Amino acid sequence: MSNSAESTAESSSANPFKIAQRQFDQAAEMLELEPAMRDLLRWPRREYKFTIPVKMDNGDSRVFHGYRVQYNDACGPTKGGLRWHPEETLDTVRALAAWMTWKTSVMEIPLGGGKGGVTCNPKELSEGEQERLARGWMRVMARQLGGDRDVPAPDVYTNPKIMAWMMDEYEVVTGRSHPAVITGKPLVVGGSLGREDATARGGVLCVREACQRTGIDPSGSYAIQGFGNAGQFAALLHRELLGGGKLLAVSDTSGAFYNPDGFDPEELVEHKRRRGGLSGMSGAREISAGELLALEVDILYPAAMESVITGANAGEVRARMICELANGPTTPEADEILEAKGVHVIPDFLANAGGVTVSYFEQVQGTYNYFWPLEKVHRELEAHMVNAYASVYRMHEEQKVHMRLAAYLVAVTRVAEAVRVRGWV
Ligand code: NAD
């Protein structure tokens, strides 16, 4: 196990941790942070890298590599998801842990940022192998976790079932009930109502707030790249919360599809549920992935993956607003181009923060062992999103910087202040 902040051999310009550090450096420069504060905030405070031996179904043992990065806990216990991905590396985990730190800060929730993962392909693992891997990860990390230390959650290729095994293993290791150690659990073992659609709900609420300030019509047209959890709920909630809107295009791994009359979001969700993909929808014309991103729409929701709007294609974007439900869909080069074109970008760690906010509510409810009705979850989430959007927009106006840099300025200022009042720097 290593808990040093040494640099790794993974360094390159496409390295997400290098991008996260570059984004932080820009904010640190504007805020004129002192050198020691910069050194502290551009590195994780603690990181764990370890091996997990797992007995496979065929009787062999296999060794997996696990990670947990506790990036910064000045504002409270660290919090962040666990990804099980074949390309997981320490640097992807570091970058995502840094972004979680800025996300909890911009939301003003009393938590820090963390992230974890395992390098594996869960599609190649049986259910029993997944359970043994989940329990193995938890046995290594249990003593470093807890509602008052560090709280994991589901992320790419992990789910409520895996969180339930992990919570159970934690309770076996520590000998006590502690549902607040992990969030994103099934309801019956301490999950929160409202977690399923929280990310999309938070993003659509940001769009509502942005439309009021920019004059963009919320009942105009919209397009969604990626039709998974975040994309499907965004399609439905856009109509429900904004009172209209024509869904002109959607995409998933089966292709990108356009309907000039607008898709019915409920029919699309039902079609995807039945057929496993979007292809074959009536009234749909297939378009390219690039055409979807270049459509003339009021609002574009990237909800699939990172680095899809780049220096190469940002010039073609004709959306008036981009709500980044995905993590990292826009590169720093694209940010500059979109800013020059006057596109209003709601940056990822604000736009998709509804998920961690309801995870935080789950942690609070688990600590009290008293659970809220759905209406209260929605009310509290709305209050947090409205407040966070307003802080970032105010900074954007006052400092005349694009929304992502404004979000960084808000988030980094708060964490730096917590570091200062604790007397660390
Ligand atoms: P998901 O796996 O449920 O859905 C992803 C969707 O994207 C799938 O429909 C897939 O077919 C589609 N997709 C993949 N590659 C694509 C491509 N090249 N073009 C078009 N579509 C493609 O994942 P999700 O939970 O909806 O997450 C989506 C994004 O939102 C990720 O970046 C994730 O990190 C981010 N996010 C999600 C949450 C959450 O609570 N679900 C929270 C924060 C951030």
Image (cartoon, rainbow, N blue to C red):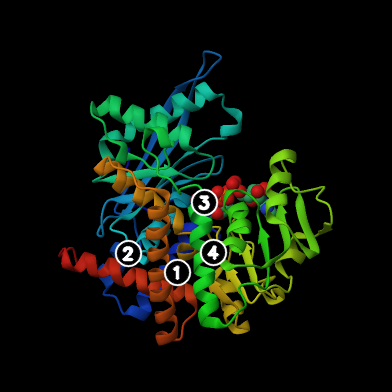
Q: Amino acid at mark 4?
A: Val
> Earlier along the polypeptide chain: callout 3 or callout 4?
3
Q: Nearer the viewer, mark 2 or mark 3?
A: 3
Where disc 1 sits, the SS reads: helix
Circle 4 residue? 204
Q: Using the image, tell me which numbered label, if any, was put on residue 311.
A: none
Circle 1: residue type: Gln
The answer to whether one can see residue 362 in this image is yes
Which numbered marker is on residue 23?
Answer: 1
Q: Earlier in the sequence, mark 2 or mark 4?
A: 2
Residue under pointer 3:
197
Q: Secondary structure at mark 3?
A: loop
* Above-or-below relation of 92 to 308: above
User: How far is disc 2 from disc 4 in space, using C-alphas?
Assistant: 19 Å
> Looking at the rendering, in which quadrant would you find the N terminus?
top left
Q: Looking at the image, can residue 137 be seen?
A: no
**Which class describes the residues within 10 Å of circle 4: few (<14), some (14-19), or many (20+)?**
many
Between the residue at mark 1 and the residue at mark 4, the CA separation in whole angstroms equals 25 Å
Q: Which residue is mark 2?
A: 108
- Look at discs 1 and 2 and give the one toward the viewer: 2
Q: Earlier in the sequence, mark 1 or mark 4?
A: 1
In the rendered structure, are the residues bearing label 2 and label 4 in contact, judged by CB atoms less than 8 Å apart? no
Q: Residue at x 26, y 31 (%)?
A: 177
